[in-house]
Amino acid sequence: MGFERLILRVSVDVNPTEDPGKVQVAVEKMFGEISLRIVTEEGRSRLTGEFEGREALLRFHDLLRREQILDAARGVLLKGIQGNTICFYLNKQVAYVGHVSFSQSVGESPLGPIRVEIESDDPRAVIDWLAPKTV
């Protein structure tokens, strides 16, 4: 496991029609019980959280295996590398029922996606750990 430092950042809009508790449950089903806080700016609410350490990704790591989507996940994660950060989006409604579905930043999910950033000194090593090549 060739990475030392890892910071997970999660951000998700909470629409006026949504229960913030349910949005938090969607995030927790992907990443476990990470501490989230509500931020309101310009009349819009958003849940944000930051967690340091590999433990933040253990549940997601297990979900990718359970759902047998390592190759798809690897492709999405590799495309999301920007410097020392991996950025990707998850479908909020699908996350709420405990499944992983990657999403686009806008348009694909009517309630908006969960934005995920993983910052690391070695993003490729993080991807190799999360979603190794299967062939």
Image (cartoon, rainbow, N blue to C red):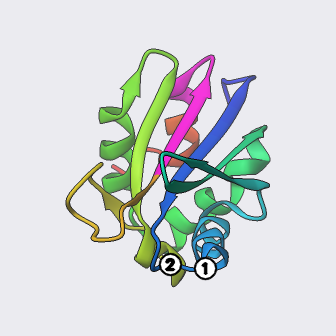
- The quarter of the image holding the N terminus is top right
Q: Which mark is residue 84?
A: none
Rate crowding at label 2 as few (under 14), some (14 to 19) or many (20 or more) other CA atoms within 10 Å: few
| Total numbered labels placed on residues in the image | 2
Farthest residue, direction bottom: 97
In the image, residue 29 above or below residue 131: below
Front position in the image: 59 or 70: 59
Rate crowding at label 1 as few (under 14), some (14 to 19) or many (20 or more) other CA atoms within 10 Å: some
Q: Is residue 61 left or right of residue 36?
A: left
Q: Residue at x 50, y 37 (%)?
A: 127
Measured from the top left, where is residue 50 in percent x and y?
71, 41
Front position in the image: 102 or 13: 13
Residue 124 among magenta residues? yes
Looking at the image, is mark 1 or mark 2 nearer the viewer? 2
Estimate the spatial distance between the alpha carbons at disc 1 and disc 2, rounded to whole Å. Answer: 7 Å
* Mark 2, secondary structure of its residue: loop
* Mark 1, secondary structure of its residue: helix
Front position in the image: 97 or 123: 97
Q: Which residue is mark 2?
A: 18
Q: Which residues lie in the magenta part?
A: 115-125
Q: Is residue 67 left or right of residue 8?
A: left
Q: Amino acid at mark 1?
A: Lys
Q: Is residue 33 left or right of residue 129?
A: right
Residue 133 visible in this rendered orientation of the protein:
no
Q: Amino acid at mark 2?
A: Glu
Measured from the top left, where is residue 95 in percent x and y?
49, 73
Q: Are marks 1 and 2 in contact (CB under 8 Å)?
A: yes
Q: Which mark is residue 22?
A: 1
Q: Residue at x 30, y 58 (%)?
A: 103
